[in-house]
Image (tube, helix red, strand yellow):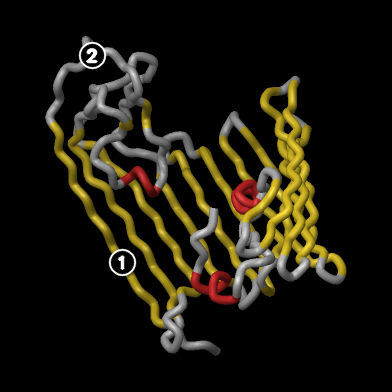
């Protein structure tokens, strides 16, 4: 029962780079980019300057959006794309296998707001030649208000990982807020990362404490304790867990940000 403006946005890019033999050039700081929408339209498939990839290829993608006409807000976005090679890729790294396929995996993504408070974000990498899913991730977020967020996510990478991720920030009582994250490897049947923290908003000061447990390898973990007292407008004492919480809990809100910072962004460390 709601009117939307739907867009159809095709994108095409052709790249031709002649082959040059580079086997005698040592590799110092070059690696292959991770495959995804951020890389599929780039000219060089390698980072660094030790290898310049040859290319005779075309990349095709199409995006469709549903936009609310009155507010201009994007309600839904769907994208699908793939790259096609007209010649074999001959430039490779020393430990890299040369690809003989004339096409890459297909990429697809779907994201949007299911309602005012619930949003969805998902992505898929599908191997058409082998009819297998190489990577898949989906995240669901409930965000009714500032500093109130619940996240659940699932990540899959073929033969590498299957992770379930839960995170949240929520008022507990009075001026107390709780924040937590648990990431569990289904493949390895163990918790790979856990965060638990408490925050108290005292008006002109904020107290934060957090415990971080991170698995560095199958047999070892690292533990860190953060304890910070922040005096508004003056500075803070102790190591800050804010960057860790922002990185680990999508939608995390700094409880002592001003109203303008909450809605227009804040340039804070």
Residue at coordinates 21% horizontally, 10% vertically from top-left? 24
The quadrant in which the N terminus is found is bottom right
Structural distance between the alpha carbons of marks 2 and 1: 41 Å
Note whether 127 is above or below 70 in the view shown.
Answer: above
Regarding mark 2 in the picture, which secondary structure is present there?
loop
Mark 1 burial class by Cα count in 10 Å: few <14, some 14-19, many 20+: few
Q: Is residue 58 visible?
A: yes
Q: How many numbered marks have been drawn onto this rendered protein structure? A: 2
- Residue 2 position within the rendered picture, expressed as x and y whole percent measured from the top left: 52, 88
- Residue 98 position within the rendered picture, expressed as x and y whole percent measured from the top left: 32, 21
Residue 139's tag is none
Mark 2 burial class by Cα count in 10 Å: few <14, some 14-19, many 20+: few
Disc 2 or 1, which lies upstream in sequence?
A: 1
- Residue 86 position within the rendered picture, expressed as x and y whole percent measured from the top left: 20, 36
Indicate left or right for 65 with 15 as reference.
Answer: right
Residue at coordinates 76% horizontally, 56% vertically from top-left? 207
Residue marked by disc 1? 9
Note whether 44 is above or below 36 in the view shown.
Answer: above
Q: Quadrant of residue 253?
A: bottom right
Residue marked by disc 2? 25
Which residue lies most toward the right here? 173
Residue at coordinates 69% horizontally, 65% vertically from top-left? 255
Q: Can you tell which of label 2 and label 1 is closer to the viewer?
A: 2
Asked whether disc 2 touches disc 1, contact meaning CB atoms under 8 Å apart, the reply is: no
């Amino acid at each position: 029962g709601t009117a939307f403006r739907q867009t159809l946005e095709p994108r095409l890019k052709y790249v031709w780079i002649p082959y040059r033999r580079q086997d005698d050039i040592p590799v110092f700081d070059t690696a292959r980019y991770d495959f995804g929408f951020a890389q599929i339209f780039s000219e060089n498939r390698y980072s660094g300057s030790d290898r310049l990839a040859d290319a005779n290829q075309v990349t095709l993608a199409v995006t469709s959006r549903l936009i609310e006409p009155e507010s201009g807000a994007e309600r839904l976005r769907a994208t699908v794309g793939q790259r096609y090679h007209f010649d074999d890729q001959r430039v490779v790294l020393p430990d890299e296998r040369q690809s003989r396929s004339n096409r890459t995996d297909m990429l697809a993504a779907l994201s949007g707001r299911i309602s005012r408070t619930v949003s969805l974000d998902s992505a898929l990498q599908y191997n058409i030649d082998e009819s297998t899913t190489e990577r898949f991730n989906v995240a669901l977020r409930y965000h009714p208000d500032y500093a109130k967020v619940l996240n659940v996510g699932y990540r899959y990478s073929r033969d590498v990982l299957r992770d379930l991720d839960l995170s949240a920030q929520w008022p507990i009582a009075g001026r107390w807020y709780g924040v937590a994250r648990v990431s569990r490897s289904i493949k390895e049947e163990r918790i790979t990362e856990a965060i638990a923290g408490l925050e108290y908003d005292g008006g002109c000061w904020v107290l934060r404490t957090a415990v971080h447990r991170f698995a560095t390898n199958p047999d070892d973990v690292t533990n860190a304790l953060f304890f910070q007292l922040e005096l508004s407008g003056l500075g803070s004492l102790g190591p800050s867990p804010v960057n860790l919480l922002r990185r680990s809990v999508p939608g995390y809100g700094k409880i002592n940000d001003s109203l303008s910072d909450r809605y227009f962004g804040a340039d804070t460390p």
